[in-house]
Image: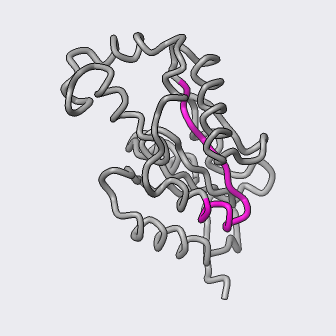
Amino acid sequence: MTLFLDMDGVIADFFSLLAKLNNVHHWKQIKSVDQALLDICQTDFFNQIEPFQISRDLIKFAQSHGDWGICSSPLKNDINNSTYWKKVWLKRHGFMPSQEKCIFTLNKHKYARNAVSLAPNILVDDKPDNIWNWVNAGGIGIRFQADQDDFGTLINQLSSIQKLRLIDVSDSSLRYKSAS
């Protein structure tokens, strides 16, 4: 079971920088979000983002899990460039997982299960659609937005999930029991 963390909204304060660059207090006040996203294409925007205060602790928790990674969406109109700068950001902050667990995709749900064992993977993401698609693909999803949600509650949720282990996979149904 791999624990995947999203970047923007979970460990990287994407929305604050987007708001600042568009001279608004909150990103939802941006008149055209689509245009604002186009404006950051082919820039190093993703390397300018600040981590959240809890980011280092969340990464340390993920590392203590053992099998962890990043599963983040690049900008759909700037896939190569935004992926490049996200990787630079991860390295600069010491948050880079192993290369095979550093995934940038517009289809996160494809990683909801381990390809070999079919065990569910965990995704912590701020976007409800990503969580919905992940869960529907057989994974375990936790919606978390670092600037709004309680970090302690997230850690408790992740800790309780880690105490579960897969005991049967048949007919696409998963059954769990305590690992103790």
Residue displayed at 60% across by 35% down: 89
Residue displayed at 56% across by 46% down: 137
Residue displayed at 55% across by 26% down: 74
Q: Position of residue 153 (x, y in %)?
A: 39, 69
Q: Nearer the viewer, residue 123 or 153?
A: 153
Residue displayed at 61% across by 51% down: 4
Q: Nearer the viewer, residue 25 or 115?
A: 25
Tell which residue pokes out farthest to the right in this image.
116
Q: Nearer the viewer, residue 107 or 64?
A: 64
Q: Quadrant of residue 106?
A: top right
58 sits to left or right of 69: left
Q: Position of residue 116 (x, y in %)?
A: 81, 51
User: Would you place residue 2 above or below residue 44 in this image?
Assistant: below
54 sits to left or right of 81: left
Residue 137 in view of the camera? yes
Q: Is residue 66 magenta?
A: yes
Q: Quadrant of residue 177?
A: bottom right
Q: Position of residue 87 (x, y in %)?
A: 66, 32
Q: Quarter holding the N terminus?
A: bottom right
* Range drawn in magenta: 60-74
Q: Is residue 124 magenta?
A: no
Q: Position of residue 143 (x, y in %)?
A: 41, 53
Q: Quarter holding the C terminus?
A: bottom right
